[in-house]
Amino acid sequence: MNALLKRITAAFLAAAVICTNFTACDSGSAKSKPVAVDENGNVDMEVALKYETDIDALKAELEGREVDPSKPVSQHLNKKTLEVFNFLRETYGKKTLIGQQMMDKKCYEDDVYYKANEDLPAIKGFDMIFSNLKNGNNEQIDEAIKWHTESGGLVTFTWHWQVPRKIGNDALGKAFYTEEIEEFSLEKAVTPGTAEYEVIICDIDTIAIQLQRLEAADVPVLWRPLHEASGSWFWWGGSSRDEPLHEYYQKLWLMVFDRLENYHKLTNLIWIWNGQDERHNVNANTYDIAGMDYYGSEDDHGSQLASYNKLSKMVPEGKMLALTECGGLPALEEMEKDGFIWLYSMLWYGSFTFLSGNNSNTPITDNDGMAQINTNRMSEEFLKSYMESDKTITWKRLPSYENTKKEMPEQMALRYKLAEWSSKH
C-alpha cells in the first residue's frame, strides 16, 4: 500500500470510527478534529507524537485567564452541551440531581428507582475502563448513547485507566490499581521520549476516539478523568500518599486537558476535577465541577459536610461541587440543616443499590424478575421520599433536549412490563 493510499485509508477509518452505527454524524454535531489512525484503525503514533503539550506555556495561558464559574472552561462547546452546562448552573445551590453509576447493560439499578417512584435517576455514570484496551469492550459507550438519545438522561464518564503492569512486557497485561503494577513510572509518563509517555499519548487519543463517538451522537459528557488522585490506590495518584508525586499528576492532568481541549478540540465535554486534595489541585480554568467521593457505613445518609467544606476551600467560590461517588445518598434534610446542597450525588453500582448475594453485583430479584432494593443501605420509603422531593431532579424532571426521546430504557421497560403482566395473572 503506497503512502497516499495509506493516508486516504487512515482518514476514512477515522471518520468511520466516529460515525459507526450513528446517524447523528449527518447532523454536523461532531466538530472536533478527528484522531489520526493507521490502516488498522489504531492511533497513528507518528502523527500523535508530533503534538506535545507545552506545560509552561499552558500554565501561563491558564493563569492569565480570569476564572469565571458561570462559563464553561472549554472554548468549543456545542449547543447542547452548553445547554446542559447552563442547566447545571441554574440548578446548583437550589436542587440536587440524583445520579447512579452503571456497570452492566442490564442496568438492574433502574428497578430500584422505578419501583420506588416510577422514575429514574437524572444522571447515569459510565466508565471508559476497557476503552483503551486492544479489542476492548465498549458496551458502556453504547449504553450511554442509548440513555441520552433514547431516554433523554444525562451522562457522566470516569476512566479507570489501565496501563501496562510492566512497561515493555505486554504478556503481563494491564491494570489501574497501584498494587497490581510492577513497573510503570508516573514521572516518565509525563516525560516525552519515554516508553511510558508513548503509552499515555496513545491511550489519551484512543479515549478521544470514544469521546468523539459520543460527540457524533450528540451526547454531552460530564467528564471525570484521573479521579480520586489523593489516594495511592490508582497509579496516577502515586505509589504512596507521602511521595511528592502530585506535580506529575498535575502535569498528566494538563496533558489530558490539553490534548482533548486544544488539540482534538472536543465539543461535548463538561470537565470534572476529582483530585480530593490540595496537593493535587489543578488550575480552575481546567474544570467546571469539583467532586469528592465518600463511602461511609451502610446506613450513612449524612450530608458529608466535612467533604463539602474541604472541597470548597480548595476551589474558587462559585465552582459547582458534586458528590461524584458515594455509598449512600445524602439525606435532603441533612443538607438543608448544614446549609448546602450538592450539585449531584452519584450512588455506586451493584450492591450499593440493590440486594445481592455473597456481596456480589448480581441482584436478588423478586418473583417478577426485578432487582430488590438493598434495605441495609436505604429503605424504599427513604428513596421514594427523596425522589418525590421538590429539591431533587430526577429523570422525568430533566429538560428535553434536541435530538433526544424520552422513552423508558429498553431493558427496564421489558422487565417492568413483565412484572406488570405477572402481577395481573
Image: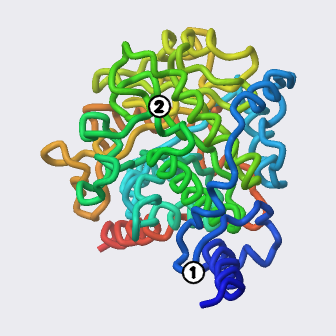
Q: How crowded is mark 2: few (under 14 residues within 10 Å), some or many (20 or more)?
A: some
Secondary element at image label 1 = loop
Identify which residue is drawn at 51% across, 54% down.
203
- Residue at x 52% of width, y 67% of height: 142
Q: Where is residue 249 in the image (x, y as percent from the top left)?
A: 52, 29
* Residue 10 higher or lower than 237, as above or below: below
Q: Is residue 147 left or right of residue 140?
A: right
Q: Position of residue 161 (x, y in %)?
A: 43, 46
Mark 1 residue type: Glu
Tell me what residue is drawn at x 29 percent, y 47 percent: 165
Dividing the picture into quarters, in which one does residue 105 lie?
bottom left
- Choose between 276 and 243: the one closer to the eye: 243
Quadrant where the image shows the N terminus: bottom right
Q: Distance between the residues labelled 1 and 2?
A: 32 Å
Q: In which quarter of the image is the C terminus?
A: bottom left
Residue 216: give x, y in percent of width and height: 70, 67
In the visual, does 355 lie left or right of 421?
left
Looking at the rendered structure, the secondary structure element under dot 2 is helix
Q: Mark 2: which amino acid? A: Glu
Residue 187 numbered tag: 2
Q: Is residue 107 left or right of residue 409?
A: left
| Residue that mark 1 sits on | 39
Q: Residues within 10 Å of mark 1 (few under 14, many from 20)?
A: some
| Left-right relation of 24 to 336 | right
Q: Quadrant of residue 224?
A: top right
N-term mark: 1 or 2: 1
Q: Does the image show residue 19?
A: yes
Residue 116, image x, y percentages = 43, 46
